[in-house]
Image (spheres, rainbow, N blue to C red):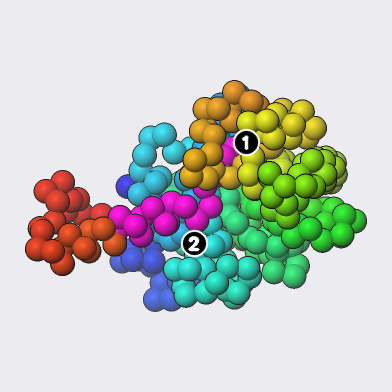
């Protein structure tokens, strides 16, 4: 598995109680990881992020040579602690979870921080403090001016911390309309307008979750910019290779990897209940 930059909570030298403020990577490492994450967004190859939700899932994904960075999923982390998505999980618990992930790997970590828990600048400042170097912040279709101000607050907070933080500013414009119904064109135009404003305010990329088929992806790239759009991969949607061809910078998968893992767990449990043994290729160490 990937090496850690300092003592992990389970190591002999670790403190009795995990404190992410005391056990985070050094400022120099955070700075370097932020630069590395930003470079991955500017590369011609699409940045594919398989979302993780705890240290175990992070290490499994980080151990793959194809993995260049890690992204957390707020929905998946909340579910792991028994909370519904939508900022129901306490922000301290969310920061603790993403801090543990950042501490456990040498890869850059970008976190889904929902809408910023009422103070986007402060939540990002605290996230940087535990080793996170990028984040999604949702606009939840708040008024245009307020959404742009939130982006500016995040950028200012990162600048004050001396980190080129990679803000993947999310607009929910496409989540408000059915792709086959009336108002879809207006929703796409709204996403483009908001996306441009977020970039002007300092965001590195614009995250547009929703039904982004190839035609919509082309419109978003044309309107927002080449290698400036981030999308959510969904079952049956375009592949990462197709999005790369269209000029998309980044694809992530939100809660879907956790759901795949849980489906595999349930299938394994059913097999064991039916009398089957564990598969012979089951890893004997983690």
Q: Is residue 92 visible?
A: no
Q: Nearer the viewer, residue 188 or 121?
A: 188
| Mark earlier in primary sequence (1, 2) | 2
For the residues bearing labels 1 and 2, Cβ distance under 8 angstroms: no
Badge 2: residue crowd in 10 Å (few <14, some 14–19, many ≥20): many
* Callout 1 secondary element: loop
Disc ID at residue 4 = none
The residue identified by callout 1 is: 213
Q: Nearer the viewer, residue 172 or 18?
A: 172
- Vertical comparison of 224 with 155: above or below: above
- Residue 251's x, y, as percent? 57, 40
- Vertical comparison of 204 with 240: above or below: below
**Alpha-carbon distance for marks 1 and 2?**
24 Å
The residue identified by callout 2 is: 76
163 left or right of 62 in image: right
89 left or right of 220 in image: left
User: Residue at the spot x=70%, y=41% of the render?
Assistant: 205
Please give the range of residues in magenta: 250-265
The magenta stretch spans residue 254: yes
């Amino acid at each position: 598995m990937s090496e850690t930059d300092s003592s992990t909570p389970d190591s002999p030298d670790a403190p009795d109680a995990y404190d992410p403020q005391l056990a985070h990577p050094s400022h120099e490492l955070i700075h370097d990881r932020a630069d590395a994450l930003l470079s991955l967004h500017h590369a011609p190859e699409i940045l594919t992020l398989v979302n993780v939700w705890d240290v175990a899932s992070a290490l499994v994904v980080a151990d793959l040579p194809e993995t260049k960075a890690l992204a957390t999923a707020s929905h998946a982390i909340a579910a792991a602690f028994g909370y519904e998505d939508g900022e129901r999980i306490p922000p301290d618990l969310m920061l603790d979870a993403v801090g543990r992930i950042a501490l456990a790997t040498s890869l850059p970590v970008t976190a889904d921080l929902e809408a910023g828990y009422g103070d986007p600048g402060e939540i990002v400042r605290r996230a940087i403090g535990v080793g996170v170097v990028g984040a999604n912040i949702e606009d939840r279709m708040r008024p245009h001016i307020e959404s742009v101000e939130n982006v500016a607050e995040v950028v200012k907070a990162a600048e004050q911390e001396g980190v080129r933080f990679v803000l993947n500013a999310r607009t929910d414009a496409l989540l408000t309309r059915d792709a086959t119904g009336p108002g879809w064109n207006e929703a796409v135009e709204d996403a483009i307008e908001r996306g441009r404003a977020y970039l002007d305010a300092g965001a590195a990329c614009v995250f547009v979750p929703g039904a982004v088929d190839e035609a919509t992806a082309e419109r978003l790239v044309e309107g927002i910019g080449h290698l400036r759009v981030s999308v959510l991969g969904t079952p049956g949607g375009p592949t990462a290779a197709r999005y790369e061809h269209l000029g998309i910078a980044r694809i992530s998968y939100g809660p879907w990897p956790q759901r795949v893992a849980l489906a595999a767990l349930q299938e394994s449990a059913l097999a064991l209940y039916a009398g089957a043994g564990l598969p012979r290729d089951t890893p004997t160490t983690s």
